[in-house]
Amino acid sequence: MFDLKNETTALIERNKTLSNEKWDIVEHAIATSNETCSRLFDEVLLPLSGMEGKLKFATGKVVWDDSLDNIERKTVRDCVAEVRDSISELRKVVTDISKELRKESEKPLNL
């Protein structure tokens, strides 16, 4: 015969288990998102910033004589400047991705 009390208890326990699993998954997703943002900053944005600074120096003037370029040949200077500008744009893209990722992970959960 069908035991309503036992079946109800089993369904309640199953519901609790599924709810706990859902929150574990949500917590893991948020932690993964935060870790990704941190790694993007540490492993991508910081090195790109250093490269950009070095290239900015290379395309600038000699410290002791503002009339001299660090790179004498214009074609090489222009090439380095192009790479510097590309790195700057790449940094902006990665920063935007990181901001969007962090914003989405910090949204209130309306589940």
Image (cartoon, rainbow, N blue to C red):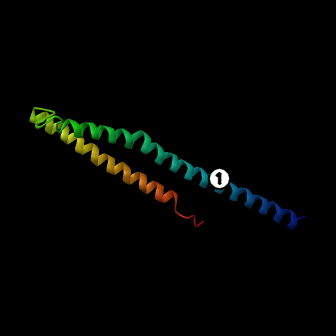
Image side of residue 1 versus residue 110, left or right: right
Name which residue lies at 67% across and 54% down.
Answer: 21
Q: Position of residue 75 (x, y in %)?
A: 10, 35
Q: Position of residue 81 (x, y in %)?
A: 19, 41
Image side of residue 78 versus residue 104, left or right: left
| Visible residue check, residue 91 | yes
Q: Quadrant of residue 40?
A: top left
Q: Quadrant of residue 56?
A: top left
Q: Which secondary structure, mark 1?
A: helix
Q: Looking at the picture, tell me which residue is in the foreground, 81 or 111.
A: 81
* Residue underneath mark 1: 24
Figure quadrant of the N terminus: bottom right
Q: Position of residue 90 (x, y in %)?
A: 31, 46
Q: How many marks?
A: 1
Name which residue lies at 73% across and 61% down.
Answer: 15
Label 1: how many residues lie within 10 Å, few (<14), some (14-19) or many (20+)? few
Q: Looking at the picture, tell me which residue is in the foreground, 37 or 8.
A: 37
